Amino acid sequence: MPNRCIKEGDNPDLTKERKTCTFDTDELTANLYGSRNNMERRREITKKISADPDFADPIPHDFLSREKCIEATAKKTKAVVQRGSEFCDVTNYYEMLHLINEAIGIGGYPLALHYGMFLPALEGQAEKELTDDIIPRAKNLEVIGAYAQTEMGHGTNLRELETTATYDKATQEFIINTPTRSAMKWWPGNLGKMSNYAVVTCQLFIDGRKIGPHNFLVQLRCEKTHEPLPGIIVGDIGPKMAFDTNDNGFLALDNIRVPRKNMLMKHAKVSPDGVYTPPMHAKLNYGTMVYVRAHMLYAHGQFLATAAIVATRYSAVRRQGRIEHGVPEVQILDYQTQQHRIFPQIARAYAIIFTYMDIKDQYDAMIKGIAEGQTDLLPDLHAITSGLKSVVTHMAGLGIEQCRMACGGHGYSDASGLPKLYGVQIGGCTYEGENMVMLQQTARYLMKAVASALQGKPLSHSVAYFGKKSSGKSRIGKEGGDIAREHEAMLEALEHAACRLSVEASQMWEKRGRGGETKERAWNGVTVEMNRAARVHTRVFMARSFHRRVTSSPPSIRPVLTDLLSLYLHYECVDMAHHLLEDGFCSGEQIRYLKSRLYEDLTTLRPNAVSLVDSFDQSDRELNSVLGRRDGNVYEALYQWARKSELNYTDVLPAVQKYVMPMMEENRSKL
Ligand SMILES: CCCCCCCC/C=C\C/C=C/C(=O)SCCNC(=O)CCNC(=O)[C@H](O)C(C)(C)COP(=O)(O)OP(=O)(O)OC[C@H]1O[C@@H](n2cnc3c(N)ncnc32)[C@H](O)[C@@H]1OP(=O)(O)O
Ligand SMILES: Cc1cc2nc3c(=O)[nH]c(=O)nc-3n(C[C@H](O)[C@H](O)[C@H](O)COP(=O)(O)OP(=O)(O)OC[C@H]3O[C@@H](n4cnc5c(N)ncnc54)[C@H](O)[C@@H]3O)c2cc1C
C-alpha cells in the first residue's frame, strides 16, 4: 500500500518501514484534515514557505539569544502579513494556522494573542459601536492587541481581580486603575513589547457598587511612536520556561480614562446614565476563554503528534542491542517497552484531534445559539471543554516526555526539538485556567448530572450516559473476539467507572455536609475525588469521540484506525484498571485479558507505526527536529547541527583562554 513519504536516498530502515504500510497514508491524512483539498493546500503552503528566503533560518533559533529570536520572528511575522496571500487563503483559519506554524514555529510571535484572544474577545463580546471602529483596524493590523486578564496576585479567581473600572456619569467615561502592586496585569502574551492596545479585565464599579469582572478596550501605546501613553507602565516579565519569542507582559494603569463605548457591551451593558444591564447568561463575559479552551485542543493534539513522529521515526532508524544472540542489532522500535512507550502516544494524538473535531462542531452550534438568543448549550460546552483542556494538556505533556525519554540521550538535546516542544506545550496545563481548578468546573457539572439522573430528569449531551442502566458486571473478554463488541464493552466499562466515581464523590460531599461542614468546605474535602471523576468522565468523552470517528471513517482506512482504537481503548482501560476493579465491575482476570490484548495491539500496529505518524503530515520545518526528519538521515544532521553552536565558532573559547588556560598553566608551574 502506498506511503507517500518514500524517497530515494532515505535511511533504508525508514524506507523498509514505509513499505510495510497496509493503508494509503494520504487517505488518512485527508481524513485528519477534513478533505484531500485541505491536505493538498497544507502541502502547497509548506512547499512555498520552505523555498522562500524570507523564512530561512541561517542559524537555528536554538543558538540565538531571546532578543535575536524575537527579532527574527518579528521579521518573519511582517513577511507573513505582507505576503500571506502568496501562500494561503488568509481568511481560512486552518490555512493561516499552518502557515504560521511553517513560517514561524511554536515559540510565539507578535500577533499570537492578537489573533488568538484580542480579536475573538472583541468579536464575541463588543457591540457594534466599538467593533465598527476597532475591528477593521485590528484586522488590518494598524493596531495590535493583547488579552490582559491575569494579575500578579490573581489569575484563577477572577472574582477577586483588583484592577478597577469606575464609571463616571459626568463624563460618560470609565476610569481604569491599578490600585496595588499585586493588581498589576502579569503574564498576558504579547502585552510587554508588541501590543499597543489590550482588552483589559477590570472590576466594574458603578455608584460605588462592585458589579464584577468586565472587559474594556484600552490603548496602551502611542500609535505613532509606540511609546507607552502617560499613566501606563508596560514591559516584559522576563525569561520563562519556554515561549521565548513571546513578550508575556506586565501592565499598570494609573487612572486611565476611556469612553463608555470601550466597555465590551455585547452581553452586559452600562447605559450613559450608569444603569447596568446583566448579560443573558452570567458567564458570557468569559466567552473568550471557552473559545480558546476549545481550540487549544487542536494545538495540543498536534504537539503530541510532533513528539510521536520524532520518537517513532528515530526509533526506526536507531539500532542498538540485540533481542536474540547472533543476529544483527535491532531497531529500537522492536523493543516491546519502546512500543509501549510510544504507540499509545500516537493513538492519543489521533484521539485528541478527533475529539477536537467534535468540540468544534459543538462550539459552532453554541455560537449560533447565542446569536439567536439561546445559551442552553453553553453550560455543557463549558463543562466538557474545562475537562478536556485539563486532561488533554496533561496527557500531551506526559506523552511528549515519554517520547523524549524514548529517544535516549539525543532526546535531551535541543536537536531533537523535544525539550522546547515540552516547554511550550506544558504551559497549557496552567494557562486558560489551572488544570485542578478547571477540572472542578467539570466536577460541579457532574454533581448536577448525578442529581438529575437520580430524579429521572433529562441529561444533556456530554452526561447522557449517566441515564444508562449499568449491567452490573463488565462484558470485557466475553465477546468471543468480536472487535466491535469488545470496543463497546470497554466503552461501557469506562462509562460505568465515570458514573460510579461521580456518584461516590457526590455521596462523600453530601456526607461531609451532613457532618456539619458548609457546602464549600465539604467540597474542599472531596476535590481530589471530584477531579478524579471529572478526569474519567472526560476520558470517556474522548474515547466516544474517537470511536465515532473510526466507525464512520472510509473503509480504506477503517482497519488501521480500528487497530489504533483497539490499542487506545485497551491502554485507557489498563491505565484506569483500578477504577474498573474497585467496585468489582471488572475482575482481575478481565484486567489480565486487557493487558494481553494491549500487547497484541503493539505487535499488530508495529508494521504501520511509521506510516501512522507519517500520516500526521507534519513537515520537517514544523517538526524542527534533527531526530524526526522525514528522510531519517539523523547522524550526519546531528553533527551538522552541533557545528552551528556558537561555542564552535572558535576552537579555543575566550573563556578558556582567559581563565582555564591560565589556571592550568599556574598549576603546571607549581610542580
Ligand atoms: C484560538 C487558538 C488558540 C491558540 C492558543 C494560543 C496559545 C496562547 C497561549 C496562552 C494564552 C493564554 C491565555 C490566558 O491564560 S487568558 C487568562 C485565562 N484565565 C483563566 O482561564 C481563569 C480561570 N478562571 C475562571 O475561568 C473562573 O474564575 C472560574 C471558572 C474558575 C470560576 O469562576 P467564578 O466566577 O468563580 O464561577 P463559579 O465557579 O462560581 O461558577 C459559577 C457558574 O458559572 C459557570 N461558569 C464559570 N465559567 C464559565 C464559562 N466560561 N462559561 C460558562 N459558564 C461558566 C460555572 O459552571 C457555574 O455554573 P453553575 O454551577 O451552574 O452555577
Ligand atoms: C504561557 C502563559 C501564557 C499566559 N497568557 C496569558 C494571557 O495571554 N492573558 C492572561 O490574562 N493571562 C495569561 N496567562 C496567565 C494564566 O491564565 C494564569 O497563570 C492561569 O490562569 C493560572 O492562574 P494563576 O497563575 O492565578 O494560578 P494559581 O491559581 O495561583 O495556581 C496556583 C496553585 O493553586 C491552586 N489553586 C488555585 N485556586 C484553587 C482552587 N480554587 N481549588 C484548588 N486549587 C486551587 C492551583 O491548582 C495551583 O496548583 C498565561 C500564563 C502562562 C503560563
Image (cartoon, rainbow, N blue to C red):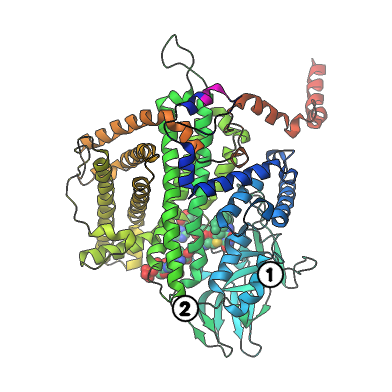
Could you tell me if the residues under marks 2 and 1 are in contact, i.e. CB atoms within 8 Å? no
Which residue corresponds to the image point at 66% horizontal and 47% vertical from the top-left? 103
Indicate the position of residue 162 as horizontal and vertical percent values.
Answer: 57, 71
Residue in the picture at 33% in, 41% down: 569
The region drawn magenta spans 11-15
Secondary structure under the numbered disc 2 in the rendered image: loop
How crowded pointer 2 is (Cα within 10 Å; few <14, some 14-19, many 20+) is rated as some
Give the residue drawn at x 66%, y 56%: 237
Q: Nearer the viewer, residue 240 or 226?
A: 226
Estimate the spatial distance between the alpha carbons at disc 2 and disc 1, rounded to whole Å. Answer: 27 Å
Residue 654 rendering spot, x and y as whole percentages: 81, 31
Closer to the camera, 322 or 615?
A: 615
As shown in the figure, which amino acid type bears the numbered disc 1?
Arg
Give left or right: position of 135 versus 311.
right
Between 391 and 132, the one nearer to me in the picture: 132
Say whether residue 148 is left or right of residue 331.
Answer: right
Instruction: Name the disc covering residue 137, or none.
Output: 1
Dominant SS of magenta comes to helix
Q: Secondary structure at mark 1?
A: helix
On the rendered image, what quadrant is the C terminus found in? top right
Was residue 19 drawn as part of the magenta stretch in this picture?
Answer: no
Disc 1 Cβ-to-ligand 1 distance below 8 Å: no
- Type of amino acid under label 2: Pro
Above or below, 263 against 65 in this view is below
